[in-house]
Structure formats: structure tokens, C-alpha cells
Amino acid sequence: MIRLIKISLAAFASLFCLFYALQNIANLQAAFGFVAYIGSMADHPAYPQSFGPAVTSPALIWILLWIIIGLELLAGVLAGKGAVDLFRARNASAADFNAAKKWAVAGCGVGVLVWFGIFGAFAGAYFQMWQNEAGTNALQGSFWYSMQMAVAWLLIAATDD
């Protein structure tokens, strides 16, 4: 039963990441506008100054957006491969099942890096997106997403005896 849960977690982690990437692609101009707004550091009443510069170059904004989308896709593909590998090893020995976790763990780990690292550290702390309503909502969502990915990561990675 625990193996089927781990396989399901890897599959759902994959879908989660892929759906976010595909939604960003389907709403590419809106996603660009959001990244541009956050990168501009506009509407920062609480901490109006920053130790670093805002990002306003359209080229840099597109690069940042495609990094986000690319990492979401990567996380989804890795977790998906992991789910397939785990499914194939579901009746194998504990050692083989544990070895099959590699890509699922990597996918969830990349997911944590996207939503904790990019959104939490860079967008939240550096670009101070918590200072406006749109940014606050995104930052709250990224916290939930990073925690969901982290829990899936830890549960999948737990050793099966």
C-alpha cells in the first residue's frame, strides 16, 4: 500500500508541476506582466528602498519567466519519470524500489527549488513581493506549493524496508 501511495505522490507531483508550467504558457503575456510587475519592485510602501536594483529590461524579464517555466517543466518531467520507474518497481525488492525513487525525488526537489527558492527567496525576499496584493497572494501560494512538494519529497524518499 505504501508503495502505491509513493507512486501516486510522484505522479501528482508531476502533474502539479506540468499543469503550472502549461498554465504559464497558456497565459504567457499575463505571466510576463506579473514577473515584470514583481521585478519592477513597484508599490512597495513598507520598504520603498532595496539593496539591489529592480529588473525592468523586457529581455531579462523574459529570461526569468522562461527559467521559471523551464524549471516547472523539468520538475514535472523528472517526477513523472520517477512515477513510471516506481510503478515498474512496485513488486521489486526494497533495494530496487528505493533505487527507483531517484527521479521522483529529483523532480520534487526541483519543485521545492522553484517555489521556495525562486518565489520565496528571490521574489519574496529580494523583490519584496509581499508588499503588494498580487505578490502576497503569489507568495502565499508558493509557500503552499513548496511545502506540498517538500512533503511529497520526504515521503517518497523515506526508505522502504
Image (spheres, rainbow, N blue to C red):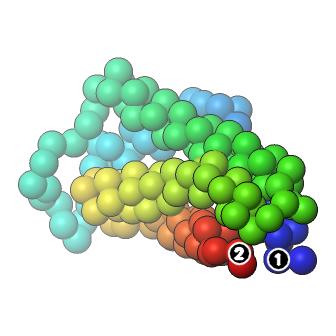
Q: Is residue 14 visible?
A: no
Q: Is residue 158 visible?
A: yes
Toward the viewer: 92 or 142? 92
Tell me which corner region of the image, top left, top right, bottom left or bottom right, holds residue 97: bottom right
Toward the viewer: 114 or 5? 5
Q: Which residue is mark 1?
A: 2
x, y percentage for residue 58?
A: 35, 24
| Residue reaching furthest to the top | 59
x, y percentage for residue 11?
A: 79, 55
Which marked residue is nearer to the observer: mark 2 or mark 1? Answer: 2
* Quadrant for the C terminus in the image: bottom right
Find numbered disc 2 in the image and state the secondary structure of the residue it sits on.
loop
x, y percentage for residue 112?
A: 50, 60
Kindly identify the residue that appears in the image at 87 percent across and 68 percent down: 4
Tell me which corner region of the image, top left, top right, bottom left or bottom right, holds residue 56: top left
Q: Residues within 10 Å of mark 2 (few under 14, many from 20)?
A: few
Find numbered disc 1 in the image and state the secondary structure of the residue it sits on.
helix
Q: Is residue 98 left or right of residue 133?
A: right
x, y percentage for residue 26?
A: 70, 32
Of callouts 2 and 1, the N-terminal one: 1
